[in-house]
Image (spheres, rainbow, N blue to C red):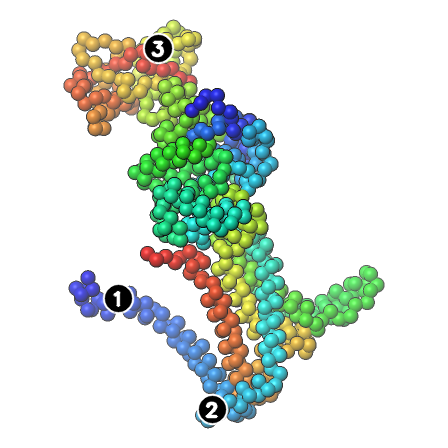
Amino acid sequence: MSVRTPKKTREFGPGFFGALASSPFGLLMLFGFVAPLLCVVWFGFMPPKTFELLQVPTLQNYEVIFNQTYFKSILWSLGLAAVTVAILLVICYPLAFALAKIFKGGASFVTYAIATSLFVSENIRLFGWVIGFMKNGVVGGTLAKLLGVQVDSLLYNVPVIILGMVYVYLPFMLFPLTLGVKMVPDQVREAAFDLGANRWQVFKKIDLPLSMPGVLIGSLLVFVLSVGAISEAKILGGQKVVTIASDIESEFTYAQNWPLGSALSTLFIALTAIVVFFALGRFDLEKLLGKKSNE
Amino acid sequence: MDESAAPILEVASVTKRFGKFTAVNDVSFKIRDGEFFTLVGPSGSGKTTLLRILVGMEKPTTGELRLRGEIINDLPPNRRPTCMVFQSLALFPHMTVGKNVEFPLTIRGASESDRRTRAWELLKLLHLDPNRYYDKNVSQCSGGERQRVALARALAYDPEILFFDEPLSALDARLRKMLQKELKDIQRSTKKTFCYVTHSLEEAMVMSDRVAILRAGVIEQIGMPDEIYASPKNAFVAEFMGEVNLLDITALGGASATWDTGRKTVPLALPELPVPLEAGAKRKLLIRPESLRFLAAGEHAGNTVPVKILNEFSLGSRIQYHVEVCPGCTLTVERLREERTAAAAGVLGWELADSQVLES
Ligand SMILES: Nc1ncnc2c1ncn2[C@@H]1O[C@H](COP(=O)(O)OP(=O)(O)OP(=O)(O)O)[C@@H](O)[C@H]1O
Ligand SMILES: [Mg+2]
């Protein structure tokens, strides 16, 4: 067949037009993402506290990183993100199930309500929390007035940081999860139930595996967003916890050490990428979606 | 089927309402142990709703279900010894054929070797070569194969009654016929009670020991297929049984009546009835296409009408005619090919005993 296909039509086949159509996106990715990324990676190998890109590469920055306590902030970031993902999974699964399977009609109202919270800047919402939780703030003041108990500031500790992150990233978990749960056909659940499975077994053997694409996408979104989070720890946590993102920020601004900031960024991006690709590799999305066939 | 067989499932005055709408209306019947029972009715007649009540996925608004005498209204589906094969089959898309079939055994906590042995047995019983299919993904199976997997999975649960909700309706006619026979064979060899739902009476007739005909949530008639065919209770059942002629008649008292064809009225003689109709009573007269025949000159019949032949369709050894009594009023006639010459005369007749008076 292909032998008889005239050359001209092959040159302007669907592949050609596909490439043409996607070229603006390709260019955007190239200049907006790949080029700066390469710059950052390269800058990480420049001598500390310099602003020149054309110097002899050195590993000095990485030595600094490994000899100092930066690993602490990396661990804090990873840990906070992991805990946020875990808590959100537990909170959002039942909620997503209710949205997808029980409310049906009323679900869109809840969806809008939650989506609307995204319209207000994250920082503004967090400062709202500060007013609520600070010493003699809304919560403390109310408790003191009503019950006569004197509570100290509820801010500047790890739980409140996690609470803030859970709150801020909830929509990013809830919506993919809801879509995931919607993908589980009702009759398949009913069939499992009919074949003797109890609620827990239906959840474990049917709901969870079939909604895994939603679970995975939601978890990755929240993980990637919260591992780079900066405001929650800063605004709600004071200086109690320093995340890697705020370390990087201070290297670039306050410390004026761009090469070190770049090296930290590179390391951090690499770590996040490893976690993400590990997760994606463990769960084959295509297979989960049932699209894979050997035909 | 043994007439005296004990009922395994008793449905007593079951009603199901969705808001103001009554989907199943005061239905009572018994399913006997080991029989092939079929519920048949047109779309929207409440078949699926009734079936879902029987397996426990829906609660009846009122009424009782008794399994071997015990009330099971409040037993959830996972604790009932019954199992349903859905129209969509509802196979588990993330599991292989083998794991699908083993599912009920896994839930029961059977050992891996037991599960595997049983799954292989069942796949063989259903003509799926275990070597090829055990590890195959269900998404790679054809419609007929998926059908068999669903049945194997239900059999693995080892239910006392197996329910089917139109499982064959998505398949092509040839495969459907084949699977109907296989289903019947499996029912015989496993001696299980099957309760089948379909909108095709033909399918019901092929497989069932007994048939219940459902209309708008009410059971119109229950009986063996032959019984229902020979004496349908009313015009709805008769029409459901296949292509028949139903004439609108008004009794004139005694054995005579008029047939209202829309354009004119035709006087007719009625068959003998145990209780004669009162004058003015409106009924339907059922005449099967094969009971109508063309009369040659000088031949007599209980009733005769002059007709015009509109169309002829060959059905192989038989020919089906659409004939017109008057504009807008047609009858269907089915005769053997040999009798074709008589048709030309255009006089149609039937014997009184071949017609039945039915309520509409
Ligand atoms: N959950 C429900 N809520 C409201 N009405 C319902 C519900 N389920 C079924 N019905 C109504 O009950 C009637 C019977 O439905 P059912 O699905 O039992 O019909 P069926 O005989 O199975 O039809 P089909 O042959 O098309 O499958 C329909 O009019 C349907 O609209
Ligand atoms: Mg139905």
The image's mark for residue A13 is 1
Is residue B322 left or right of A210 when viewed as pictured? Answer: left
Residue name at image x 20 percent, y 69 percent: A8
Quickly name the residue at label 2.
A57
- Against A60, residue A86 (above or below) is above
Q: Toward the viewer: B221 or B272?
A: B221
Residue under circle 3?
B271
Crowding around mark 2 (Cα neighbors within 10 Å: few <14, some 14 to 19, many 20+) is: few
Give me the chain letter of mark 3: B
Q: Earlier in the sequence, mark 2 or mark 1?
A: 1
Q: Position of residue B183 (x, y in %)?
A: 38, 36
User: Marks 1 and 3: same chain?
Assistant: no
- Please determine if labels 3 and 2 lie on a single subunit: no
Q: Residue, x 61% and y 71% (percent of image)? A: A79
Asked if badges 2 and 1 are on one and the same chain, I answer: yes
Chain letter for mark 1, please. A
**In which quadrant of the rendered view does residue B177 lie?**
top left
Locate residue B184, reporting x and y percent.
Answer: 38, 33
Mark 2 C-beta closer than 8 Å to ligand 1: no
